[in-house]
Image (cartoon, grey):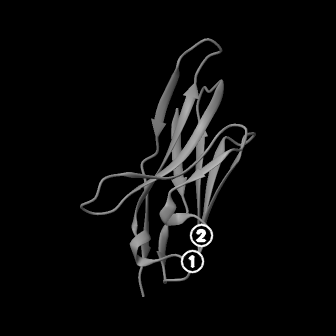
Amino acid sequence: VQLVESGGGLVQPGGSLRLSCAASGSIFSINTMCWHRQAPGKQRELVAAITSGGTTNYADSVKGRFTISRDNAKKTVYLQMNSLKPEDTAVYYCNAEVRLKIFSAWSDYWGQGTQVTVSS
């Protein structure tokens, strides 16, 4: 199973970016998909999560600015980031809870991360 993120980059404060994370491999089903981030010198934190049914949850720091969504057919999760602030600068990682076979246990998989830098 591979998770591949894309869409990071450099953006000015107040700008927008859209991150994507596509899962590939021999996957039976995907449960919750999440975005985490880790800024230099800080612990990794959960930014947003979305269940297979579409229920979402956000960190207080991004509520009203970020939107998580997913396309189950494409096995892809997105993070639309608006009104970006310098404190949003971090490496963003996607994470998915995956079942490889019908009766197998759920396992966590992570992407390699994509850098988001918010600076003027």
Q: Is residue 40 left or right of residue 77?
A: left
Measuring 49% from the left and 26% from the top, which residue is drawn there? 107
Q: Horizontal and vertical percent for residue 50?
A: 63, 45
Residue type beneath disc 2: Arg
Q: Nearer the viewer, residue 84 or 110?
A: 84
Measuring 28% from the left and 63% from the top, which residue is drawn there? 40
Q: How many marks?
A: 2
Q: Is residue 108 above or below residue 116?
A: above
Among numbered discs 2 and 1, the one appearing first in the sequence: 2
Q: Residues within 10 Å of mark 2 (few under 14, many from 20)?
A: few
Q: Residues within 10 Å of mark 1 (few under 14, many from 20)?
A: some
Q: Nearer the viewer, residue 57 or 25?
A: 57
Measuring 54% from the left and 83% from the top, which residue is drawn there? 14
CA distance separating discs 2 and 1? 6 Å
Dot 2: element: loop
Q: Which residue is mark 1?
A: 83
Q: Which residue is mark 2?
A: 65
Q: Horizontal and vertical percent for residue 83?
A: 57, 77
